[in-house]
Amino acid sequence: MVREQYTTTTPGTSLERPKNQYVYKIGIYGWRKRCLYLFVLLLLIILVVNFSLTIWILKVMWFSPTGMGHLRVTKEGLRLEGESEFLFPLYAKEIHSREDSSLLLQSTHNVTVNARNSNGEVTGRLNVGPRMVEFHGQQFQINSKDGKPLFTVDEDEVVIGTDKLRVTGPEGALFEHSVETPLVRAEAFKQLRLESPTRSLSMDAPKGINIKAQAGNIEALSQMDIKLQSSDGVLLLDAETVRLPKLPQGTTGGPGRSQGLYEICVCPDGKLYMSVAGMSSTCHEYSHVCQ
């Protein structure tokens, strides 16, 4: 502790002030002072560099009060303009484009869209690859702009909701199982062909089957037999001329012997029936069939 002495004098007297015996210097001097200034200067440089980098990052990334770059934050969500590249999976509830442009999803390998439930399990998957498009789910459905189902596929059936299904391939359409449709029609000036190469071809209808050719012929070809059968009704051949050109002709035997030959007879109403062949026509003998 430094003690200072104070002396009072009266006018006319002179006293010598006592000299300070102890002197203390307060502060930082020497190399400590230089180190302190150097440290403060270093902190100032770091502060200026950080501030400059922050300004540069804000300018490069286009930060603004509404978003960053082409990414804008709106009330409805995030709006991204231009082309963007995602290196990791993107999770979103809804993705749509602007009203005046289309939405393009592009990848060098494939584009996969997954739908998950609350437990995180994948319930539906759409995979667009370089060679095929795969869909995994319980049901696949394509709707029109009005919400009408156009194409529906599930494990049990395939439903086409359009008014017309058009097959333009040169080989037509191949069905391994049955097909249910109210109408099968070819294009104008084209031929319609129903074929079963190794099996039988069956057409069933609860009310009726109508086969019509507006400007051409109808041909039915078979390796074996062709059967036209009606359980309750009649078989009607309505034409100006009915020809059977390849019917076999029998030879006459002895009197009263028909050798298993029959004669085809026609009733006035067009009904056909057979009668045992004889030396002359025997249709009159079995004419009671027409009654």
Image: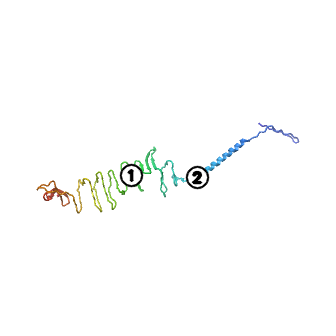
Residue farthest to the right?
12
Whole-percent x and y of residue 3? Answer: 79, 37
Q: Is residue 60 visible?
A: yes
Q: Is residue 11 left or right of residue 85?
A: right
Residue at image x 66%, y 47%?
A: 45
Q: Secondary structure at mark 2?
A: helix
Label 1 sits on residue: 152
Q: Which of the image's four quarters has the C terminus?
A: bottom left
Towards the viewer: 269 or 37: 37
* Position above or below: 235 against 27: below
Label 2 sits on residue: 60
Numbered circle sitting on residue 127 = none
Whole-percent x and y of residue 110? Answer: 46, 50
| Amino acid type, callout 2 | Val
| Colour style of the rendered protein structure | rainbow
Marks 2 and 1, the one that precedes in the sequence: 2
Q: Which of the image's four quarters has the N terminus?
A: top right
Q: Is residue 233 left or right of residue 79?
A: left
Label 2 and label 1: CA atoms lie apart by 49 Å
**Which quadrant of the view contains residue 276?**
bottom left
Q: Is residue 277 left or right of residue 198?
A: left
| Amino acid type, callout 1 | Thr
Towards the viewer: 100 or 279: 279
Towards the viewer: 149 or 271: 271
Residue at image x 40%, y 50%?
A: 140
Q: Is residue 28 visible?
A: no
Q: Residues within 10 Å of mark 2 (few under 14, many from 20)?
A: few
